[in-house]
Image (cartoon, rainbow, N blue to C red):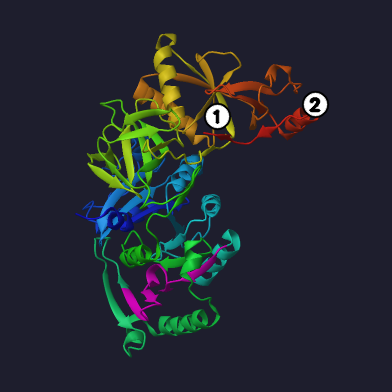
């Protein structure tokens, strides 16, 4: 029987991040192909598509061809047990991505070779920097027209403020894409398109082979020789320590769709990234191997299985070994409990498990007691991990049900979707739940809310946009918001935990509040 240490040391847990359409979901699927987790890649297409990406399970994702929730997938490859967290690329769901990055040990950043660094990439990268986690870059779509690779590296370094080290180097692009030069092996891997089956047709040729100019063409050969000389002469040194602290990003070029460069990237990545590392908690550093079981909730998803109306809490195990049926302490609730129906996931497919280890992501049945950021641990060694911040929504709407007879379903639906972190719900001071103010980071979340209430809870809603731009939590304890002197376009509200907040129409209203209420303290985010 494998020891706990051996099991934990073979774990690799990482998130894949990118701007929409950079090819993140396609790359994820190719990883799964290599692990034997799937046998056929499903293309993310429009409404008429018969197949969809295996990581996109929600119906609206299949219709729109986008990822709106984070998916979790586990598979084994080359002796490693890999947990992939596939995140939404769309900026309207960046909060879900932020929470997911809290559960990852490293990140793979996918960049479109023709577009370079895009807005959402910048946003997600900043989150990675906050976590000090290693970032590996896969520059995708080299089989299409692409920007100059030197320009791409320079843009990554300037815009994201991280050093880069190309592990391989592209030869041509688009129709002229000939393959890549592996800098470590000093070999050429030549490219032949083959419609993306599991093994791309590639052959390795030594850089000094006299036939090389014939294989890749004289012009490409001369360019490559010049590029290598420049890289080796003017480029920086590879430093694994810098990689592991998010200061240097190893860069790989390839094409996820045609499957070129994916397996070499996966192999190098697994060697460079680390097993689960120690995490900070209220009692100090928690060691993944030597400390008993502990985990935190980073995501809650209702109705993954519509037939069962279930709620799943996703937990990242931080230390020790989890066993089915073991008694744990839910720290925030202060109660001992057994985690019901522990399972590992492959998008919507689930498998009940007997055990799991630090680094693994497990889903457990949530009877409505968990919140995002909650800790579970062994009762004898109580630890508490820091909560996950709630970001300030930027768009607001008044939402009410059309049919007043469906009040119960409306309250249940909006509350459950809010507990998942997809939306935030607020009420008028002392108001009920017949109508709520919904706040979202991106407007597409309103569409998802309407769709899910209709399809999962059978509730039609009316939505009325509100003219507010900013929300702030009141930090002063015991302060009665009704006694505040505020501008006429400021609204006093409360969240589901009874905390008081203010909605502002503009920056001027915020300044007014500070100037007319001495000692007022406002925060841009609340703590879960």
Instruction: Measure the alpha-carbon separation of dots 2 and 1.
Output: 26 Å
Q: Nearer the viewer, residue 44 or 519?
A: 519
Could you say which is closer to the camera, residue 526 or residue 358? 358
Mark 2 / mark 1, whichever is N-terminal: 1
Q: Position of residue 295 (x, y in %)?
A: 39, 42
Mark in the foreground, 2 or 1? 2
Q: Which residue is mark 1?
A: 439
Residue 167 counted in the magenta span:
yes
The answer to whether 47 appears left or right of 235 in the picture is left
Q: Is residue 152 left or right of residue 30?
A: right
Q: Residue furthest left?
A: 1
Place of residue 59 in the rendered image (x, y in percent of width and height, measured from the top left): 33, 35
Residue at left 51%, top 44%?
91
Residue named by callout 2: 516
Q: What range is drawn magenta here? A: 162-190
Q: Position of residue 429 (x, y in %)?
A: 61, 16
Q: Residue furthest front?
A: 380
Query: 339 or 12: nearer the eye?
Result: 339
Q: Residues within 10 Å of mark 2 (few under 14, many from 20)?
A: few
Percent from the top left, x then y, of residue 373?
46, 37
């Amino acid at each position: 029987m494998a020891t706990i240490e051996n099991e934990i040391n073979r774990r690799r847990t990482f998130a894949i991040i990118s701007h929409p359409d950079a090819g993140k979901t396609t790359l994820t699927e190719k990883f799964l192909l290599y692990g034997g987790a799937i046998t056929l890649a499903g293309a993310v297409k429009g409404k008429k598509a018969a197949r969809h990406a295996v990581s996109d399970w929600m119906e609206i994702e299949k219709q729109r061809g986008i990822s709106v929730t984070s998916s979790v997938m586990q598979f084994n490859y080359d002796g490693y047990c890999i947990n992939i967290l596939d995140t939404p690329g769309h900026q309207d769901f960046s909060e879900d991505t932020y929470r997911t990055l809290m559960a990852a040990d490293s990140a793979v950043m996918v960049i479109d070779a023709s577009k370079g660094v895009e807005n959402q990439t910048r946003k997600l990268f900043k989150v990675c920097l906050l976590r000090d986690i290693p970032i590996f870059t896969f520059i995708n779509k080299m089989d299409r027209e692409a920007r100059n690779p030197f320009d791409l590296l320079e843009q990554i370094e300037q815009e994201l403020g991280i050093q880069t080290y190309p592990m391989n180097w592209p030869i041509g692009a688009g129709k002229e894409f000939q393959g890549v030069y592996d800098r470590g092996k000093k070999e050429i891997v030549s490219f032949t398109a083959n419609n993306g089956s599991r093994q791309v047709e590639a052959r390795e040729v030594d850089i000094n082979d006299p036939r090389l100019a014939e294989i890749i063409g004289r012009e490409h050969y001369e360019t490559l020789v010049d590029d290598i000389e420049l890289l080796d002469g003017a480029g920086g040194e590879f430093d694994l320590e810098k990689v592991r602290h998010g200061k240097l990003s190893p860069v790989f070029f390839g094409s996820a769709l045609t499957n070129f460069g994916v397996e070499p990237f996966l192999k190098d990545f697994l060697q460079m990234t680390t097993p689960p590392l120690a995490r900070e908690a209220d009692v100090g550093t928690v060691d993944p191997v030597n400390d008993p079981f502990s985990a935190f909730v980073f995501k809650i998803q209702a109705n993954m299985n519509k037939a069962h109306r279930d709620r799943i809490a996703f937990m990242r195990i931080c230390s020790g070994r989890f066993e089915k049926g073991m008694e744990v302490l839910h720290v925030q609730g202060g109660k001992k409990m057994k985690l019901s129906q522990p399972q590992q996931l492959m998008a919507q497919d689930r498998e009940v498990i007997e055990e799991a280890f630090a680094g693994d992501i497990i889903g457990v049945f949530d009877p409505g007691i968990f919140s995002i950021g909650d800790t579970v641990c062994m009762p004898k060694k109580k630890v508490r991990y820091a909560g996950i911040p709630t970001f300030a929504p930027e768009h607001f709407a008044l939402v009410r049900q059309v049919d007043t007879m469906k009040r119960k379903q409306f309250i249940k639906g909006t509350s459950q979707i809010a507990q998942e972190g997809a939306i935030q719900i607020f009420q008028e001071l002392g108001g009920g739940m017949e109508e709520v103010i919904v706040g979202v980071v991106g407007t597409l979340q309103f569409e998802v809310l309407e769709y899910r209430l209709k399809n999962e809870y059978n509730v039609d809603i009316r939505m009325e946009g509100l003219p507010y731009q900013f929300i702030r939590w009141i930090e002063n304890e015991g302060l009665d918001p009704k006694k505040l002197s505020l501008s006429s376009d400021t609204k006093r509200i409360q969240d589901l935990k009874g905390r008081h907040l203010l909605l502002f129409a503009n920056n001027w209203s915020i300044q007014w509040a500070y100037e007319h209420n001495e000692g007022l303290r406002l925060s841009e985010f609340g703590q879960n």
